Amino acid sequence: MKEDFLAELARLLRGTRRHRERLIAELAAHIEDAVSAEEIAHTPPYDAERRVLDRLGGAEAIARRWNADRRALRGRRHRRLAALAVSIAGAGALGITQYAAGKPQPPPRQPPARTTPDRETCPKQPLRSTGPCVSSSPAAKSTTRAG
Amino acid sequence: MAREAYSGHLDLLLLSALSTEARHGWGVIEHVRQMSGGRFDYPEGTIYPALHRLEEEGLLRSKWSNFEGRRRRVYELTRSGDRALHGRKQEWQEFARGIAAVIERA
């Protein structure tokens, strides 16, 4: 009787294997304790088990309540996950929008101050030199010599 | 009073039964039966889905324990469960006062 009850219950339950096995183990333990209590009250063993199973309610009633609770729990979990996904997506979109709106513009690029002669105007000036550009034109050379 | 009248308050009964000490399922049923003077006569198997649900809601915690040489799943209240119990007790007492106030005038 007890084994038939537990087998029927195992057939009807839904949910993860771990949860189902735990429920069945608890009910098996319950039956054992309840039968012990009946036998202490001098109920014959066969009658004790029959009474206990009657008081348990049928496997269908237990499975119905169990399966309904599992469905409700799954529904709540799905709704929580969906709400979390929406808030993450919303926060991400808000962050991108704020970043795009407030992103600082880079300053206009200034040409660097020239400290060395530019190769374009002083083609003959060695790169290491930091002095003024020495022109190679004849006019510049004659002015230099006269002074 | 019909059995169905008690079924809506099963959670309150289970939380109350676990407020003073940790118990396994059979112990919870026996405690409620004794404290209610036999008035509570609920299909015993259906308290286990309720205990599991209360645990999933964070109001109870449980573990396998060796109880008088037998392996039993023992339940106890969490802190949230204790708060929930006090809240539901107050709701029930308000409800009972309201009913009493009306029926006393009948």
Image: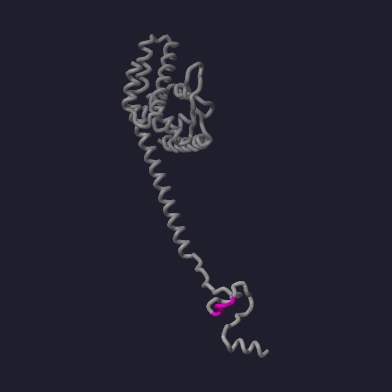
Q: Is residue A124 magenta?
A: yes
Q: Is residue A65 left or right of residue B27?
A: left
Residue A25: which quarter of the image? top left
Against A144, residue B84 (above or below) is above
Which quarter of the image is occupied by the C terminus of chain A?
bottom right
Q: Is residue B33 magenta?
A: no
Camera-side residue: A31 or B7?
Answer: A31
Percent of width and height locating residue A126:
59, 74
Against A105, residue A12 (above or below) is above
x 62%, y 80%: residue = A132
Camera-side residue: A141 or A128?
Answer: A141
Is any atom of residue B100 visible in this view?
no
Residue B3: which quarter of the image? top left
Scheme of colours in the image: one colour
Percent of width and height locating residue A76:
39, 41
Against A9, residue A42 (above or below) is above
Percent of width and height locating residue B68:
51, 16
Percent of width and height locating residue A85:
41, 49
x 37%, y 40%: residue = A75
Is any atom of residue B66 visible in this view?
yes
What secondary structure is the stretch in magenta mostly built from?
loop
x 50%, y 68%: residue = A105
Q: Is residue A90 left or right of residue A132?
A: left
Task: Tell which residue pokes out farthest to the right in this image.
Answer: A147
Q: For the magenta stretch, what is the residue range?
A: A121-125
